[in-house]
Amino acid sequence: MSATIVNTLLEKTAGFSIEETLAFLANEYKDKVVFSTSFGQEDQVITALIAKNDLPITIFTLDTGRLFQETYDVFHKTVKKYKKEIKVYFPEAASVEKLLQEKGPNSFYESVENRKECCFIRKVVPLTKALKGNAVWITGLRAEQSENRHSLDLFEYDANFDIIKFNPLLKWTLEEVQKYIDDNNVPQNALHKQGFVSIGCAPCTRAIAPGEDIRAGRWSWESSHKECGLHQK
């Protein structure tokens, strides 16, 4: 059934622009289309498109409790500019308290398993809550962000969350993203100008050097697929 829905969406939106596809989804799945933003460059482009066209798409973000101040700054600027409500989901306090009491505040540095446990508590559980009952999840994923994302499709079924995922910027380059931001005066995280391409939690993110992989700044102390569990095939 999920494959049929994906194929149907691909057929119905063939030749559509991103804005036309977003409008189609908002009309087709009334009140059940959501967009998750972490206020990175790609997500800011999609937020601008949703706001520009006044689309009834719910925008939400995950506040892990360990974000950069610069992320909160762009969050504030975005809400003021577009007058668009952004729902916030937090991790369960009891789970965070238990993690810190048992393993301390920096357990994620000790192993990939510990890091994924922290990501699960702070990101995956809140995301599961945010996606529950919805039909379409819009993301800012791009294929060139990592090797793991090269195989993503424009529309796909995410079995982990039982939802159809739409990746409108999948084929965009970073240059195209930046051009849209510049041309449309879209609020941007100040860290992007300091070498931060992919921005997550403050302890887990660093700037990258010229020529480094885009995801090199995430969990730079470990060798892994550089994913936190939100986006998996």
Image: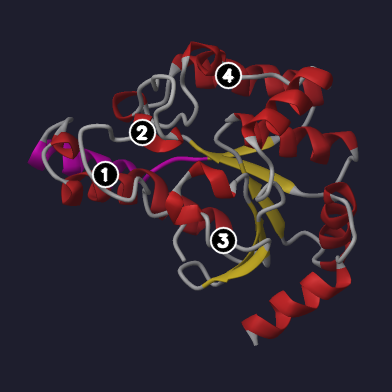
- Image mark count: 4
Q: Is residue 94 magenta?
A: yes
Q: Horizontal and vertical percent for residue 12?
A: 87, 72
Q: Nearer the viewer, mark 1 or mark 3?
A: 3
Cα separation between marks 3 and 4:
26 Å
Q: Secondary structure at mark 2?
A: helix
Cα separation between marks 1 and 2:
19 Å
- Please name whichever residue, 159 or 104, is drawn nearer the observer in this view of the structure: 159
Q: Secondary structure at mark 3?
A: loop
Q: Secondary structure at mark 1?
A: helix
Q: Which residues are magenta?
A: 89-103
Identified at 32% across, 41% down, the residue is 93
Of the image marks 4 and 1, the number of the one nearer the N terminus: 1
Q: Horizontal and vertical percent for residue 103?
A: 10, 39
Check contact, mark 1 vs mark 2: CB within 8 A. Answer: no
Look at mark 3 in the image and give the residue it sits on. Answer: 152
Q: Amino acid at mark 2?
A: Ala
Q: Horizontal and vertical percent for residue 20?
A: 90, 53
Q: Is residue 214 magenta?
A: no
Check contact, mark 3 vs mark 2: CB within 8 A. Answer: no
Look at mark 1 in the image and give the residue it sits on. Answer: 118
Of the image marks 1 and 2, the number of the one nearer the N terminus: 1
Residue 146, placed above or below residue 184: below
Asked if residue 112 lies left or right of residue 229, the reply is left
Look at mark 2 in the image and give the residue it sits on. Answer: 216
Q: Amino acid at mark 1?
A: Cys
Look at mark 4 in the image and give the residue it sits on. Answer: 189
